[in-house]
Amino acid sequence: MHILQHLEHLLWSKFKSPEPQSSSSDVLAFVDFAERIVLSANQNSPLLRDLNRFRNLRSDEQERDLAGLYLVIEQYLTEVEANTAYNRRRLRTEIRKNHSELFKLRKV
């Protein structure tokens, strides 16, 4: 009987619901952070439209598009507006420090 319980536990643990992804408020806090940096670099940046569009997405769409948005932000701040105080390393370090909840990935 003990072996059957162990096997049942192993089976159900594989189908357990995934750990929660970072919450919508965590994602929006990151978007606010990115917007402040972009605004400080260029108040007329077309990236501001993308950030506003992202804010209006449903949470599942935000989750889907977050990595792509981050890459656009990183490229913009480090290549297009290279006069900002951020290089890739500094930007990534600050995001890991202040927005670590974004790195809690859902287990598949």
Image: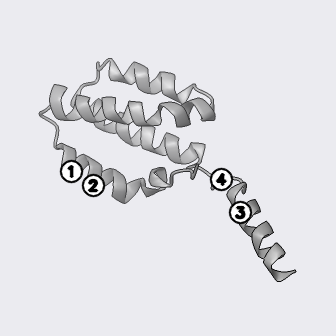
Alpha carbons under labels 3 and 2: distance apart: 34 Å
Residue occupied by mark 4: 18
Label 4 secondary element: loop
In screen coordinates, is 86 left or right of 31? left
Instruction: Measure how far apart labels 2 and 1 are at the Cα level.
Output: 5 Å
Disc 1 residue type? Answer: Arg
| Classed neighbour count for the residue bearing mark 3: other residues with Cα under 10 Å, few (<14), some (14–19), many (≥20) | few
Separation (CA) of disc 1 from disc 3: 39 Å
Which residue position holds label 2?
93
| Residue 63 visible to the viewer | yes
User: Are discs 2 and 1 less than 8 Å apart at CB?
Assistant: yes
Q: Which is closer to the viewer, label 2 or label 4? A: 4
**Residue 86 appears in the picture as rendered:** no
* Residue topped by disc 3: 13
The type of residue carrying mark 4 is: Pro
Residue 88 screen position, x and y as percent: 20, 44
- Specify few, some or many for label 4: CA neighbours under 10 Å numbering under 14, 14-19, or 20 or more: few
Of 51 and 42, nearer the camera is 51
* Residue at the disc numbered 1: 90
